[in-house]
Image: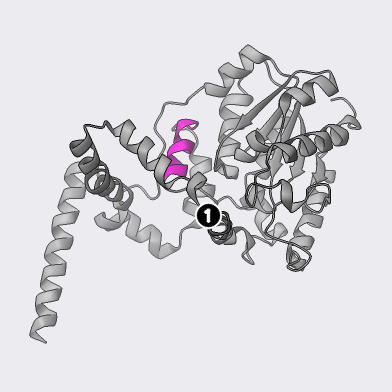
Amino acid sequence: MREFKQYLLSLLILTGLISGFVFLRFADGYPFPVGLQFDPHIRQKYEEMLAEERPQILVFGDSVVETNVDTNLMASKLGKSVSAISEPGAGSALLYLVLKNNVATAESRPDLLILLFRDTVLTSPGFRVHGSFFEVMDEYAGTEDDFALQLAIRDQMSPLEKLAEAYFPPYWGRWDLRALLVSRVINLPVRALFDCTQECSEAAMGDVFGNQNFEPDQLNEAINSAENFLYTDENLDFEGQIDRSFLPEIVRICQENNIKLILVRTKILRFSIENPEPSALTNYVNDLSAYAQSHGVILIDFARDDRLKPTVFKDMHHLNQEGKTIFSEMLIEAIGSVPPP
């Protein structure tokens, strides 16, 4: 019993010290704001790119765009200028913010927007919104983008989480504390021992521990595990998710800016003949197709296309050079029959 009291006292003292540190280092007031916050600055990287390249067609999505789409081949075959926006790790929240604050505000907007996605990403607003993913979101968001915070962050929190965010300093400051610990425990020794700047240290960590050094089967297993979120019962319920997602806003922004939207579902290696996609996902895609049709959006589904064989994949999602050519030809063929905007 005495040991437990000592433990409890130590825990209370440590909690008090951490709380005081959070107040002094990170807090501006109390209660704390619930959920992460955006800073006012909005990066205009893609707005500037569109002004310079003035594409008629824009291919848009996560890192799959870079590995799977040959824009030069598309441009030569379609006779139109084609550009690409490829944001590694992008979930629907980041795609929405880039579309709203860069593409829609550009001086030269594309006539056609081809949005590549996989399975339930477009209606899973809480997918890839924390940690380094939030940092990228913040680059393309301003303080007026509270709607994105509501859908991506606050709506995903339980009442207890919201209470802890507002009133319990260690919980509210957990991301800042983690970043501080990482910089001190991991980066500082490397920088001190090898006279390496923070950028040098981060680059070295990426070179050593990056995806390129993973054994392929382990990498695919890690990707599968990280993406289980997309296949929960909640996220497979299209009707339950659609009004809580960014997809209606993506559709609205395109329509208001006279941009024809084409959704392209890409193929992944999560499912196969031996491990077919669940019936709930099939039903989800059917509901998505009906929604797209009713809103004047074209949906192209390559998820079961046999032209993309497992041998042309580098990992679960990304294609090799041969696969890139095959996919680009498929995309050219599919959108070639689409009536002009």
Q: Position of residue 70 (x, y in %)?
A: 72, 29
Residue at (68, 41) in percent of width and height: 320
Residue shown at 70%/40% (left/top)? 116
Image mark count = 1
In the picture, residue 37 is in which quadrant?
Answer: top left
Residue that lies at the very extreme toward the bottom in this rendered image? 1
- In what element is the residue under mark 1? loop
Q: Position of residue 54 (x, y in %)?
A: 69, 15
Q: Is residue 144 visible?
A: yes
Residue 200, by quadrant, is: top left
Q: Is residue 111 above or below residue 161?
A: above
Q: Which residue is mark 1?
A: 215
> Image check: 177 left or right of 207?
left
Q: Nearer the viewer, residue 148 or 302?
A: 302
Q: Amino acid at mark 1?
A: Glu
Relative placement, left or right, of 92 versus 266 is: left
Magenta part mainly helix, strand or loop? helix
Q: Is residue 84 left or right of residue 292?
A: left
Quarter occupied by the C terminus = top right
Q: Which residues are magenta?
A: 132-142
